[in-house]
Amino acid sequence: MKLNFREALATLSRALPLVLFRAGIFVAGGFMVIVLFAMLLFASHLAGESGQTAAAAVALLAVLGGWVSSRFLQRFLLYRQRAAMLLVFSGGSGATDGMGATIEASKRLIPDYPRWKTLNRALRPALFAFIRGKKAEFHAPPDVQGAGGVARILDLQAIGPLGQAILTLAYARGGTDGGRSLREGLALYFACGMESRRLARNWVLFSAAGLIFLFLCLAVPNWIFFSSAGAPVWIGIVLAAVIAWFLHQAFIAPFVLAGLSASLLAETKGHEPDAALCEKITPLLTL
């Protein structure tokens, strides 16, 4: 699995304060989950066999509560940290002026959460149409047309992180108009992004392998501990899955975005988007 680890580390290091701040939020969320599950385990132990149904209900409520909390943080904090991180990855204007100034500069392209959702929502169907080749007026390059089986599945899974890399490219071009910036970024990606598409497949595998590795590192000792303690093993397995997701979002997800952003920026450097291609891309965007 060939990946641009060196470029990813260099790109990630530029945004280290933002990455660490974001990681701190997810790690804190992981500790909260551990506390909730410890309370659940204690309650299950006190209740005995009769309390198993109640314990399962409380576990479900804890997971739902964590999901609601993550959505709340995403809407009011995490999206802005992500946008600022992408700006730093791009090296665009305002990317080196300190964390506070960078966060303000990130509002140039993404002023608020609805705009963040709109841009990401527009990128997904455009990239999906590009991969599937559903639009007659747009012809994907040979490396996309020839992809099949596992490669096609990986391309579809890479839509999310590739969309973030295209936002990084939009920042690098200094765009303030979301529609124009996305058209130009997509045009450059479609025309020049062959290596980035190949790397995206490998980064998806790396991300999945990292999540599985984190889960196994937590699930195996949890299974041993909960079994020896006479506690429900499923609680430990669910806890391992939730904590693995938090750690994945804290440390692996930013690394993947840094690698893809570095690759796309390097691959499109010195190129200008083709006006005709931009026009063909316009119907793919639903801003």
Image: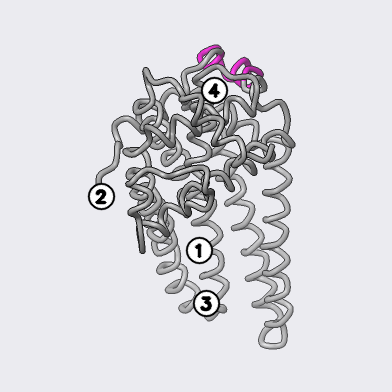
Query: Is residue 232 positioned above or below 178 on the image?
Result: below
Q: Nearer the viewer, mark 2 or mark 3?
A: 2
- Residue 132 position (above or below residue 268): below
Question: Tags 3 and 1 in contact by the CB under 8 Å rule?
Answer: no
- According to the picture, the residue beneath numbered tag 4 turns out to be 171
241 vs 11, left or right, is right
Examine the rendered structure and indicate whether residue 283 appears above or below residue 55: above
Q: Position of residue 104 (x, y in %)?
A: 66, 18
For the point 44% across and 62% down, the residue is 215
Instruction: Single out the mark in the foreground, 2 or 4.
Output: 4
Q: Which residue is mark 1?
A: 240
- Which amino acid type is marked by label 4? Tyr
Q: Dots 3 and 4: beta carbons under 8 Å?
A: no
Q: Position of residue 184 (x, y in %)?
A: 52, 27
Residue at numbered disc 2: 1
Q: Position of residue 205 (x, y in %)?
A: 36, 54
Q: CA distance from mark 1 to mark 2?
A: 27 Å
Q: Is residue 274 left or right of residue 84?
A: left
Q: Tag 1, which secondary structure?
A: helix
Residue positioned 47% across, 79% down in the render? 227
Q: Nearer the viewer, residue 104 or 261?
A: 261
Q: Position of residue 267 (x, y in %)?
A: 35, 28
How far apart marks 3 and 1 lie (CA) works out to 11 Å
Q: Which mark is residue 233?
A: 3
- Identify the residue at the far left of this view: 2
- Is 199 a magenta residue? no
Q: Which residues are magenta?
A: 94-105
Q: Earlier in the sequence, mark 1 or mark 2?
A: 2
- Which numbered mark, 1 or 4, is in the foreground of this view? 4
Mark 2 vs 3: CB contact within 8 A: no
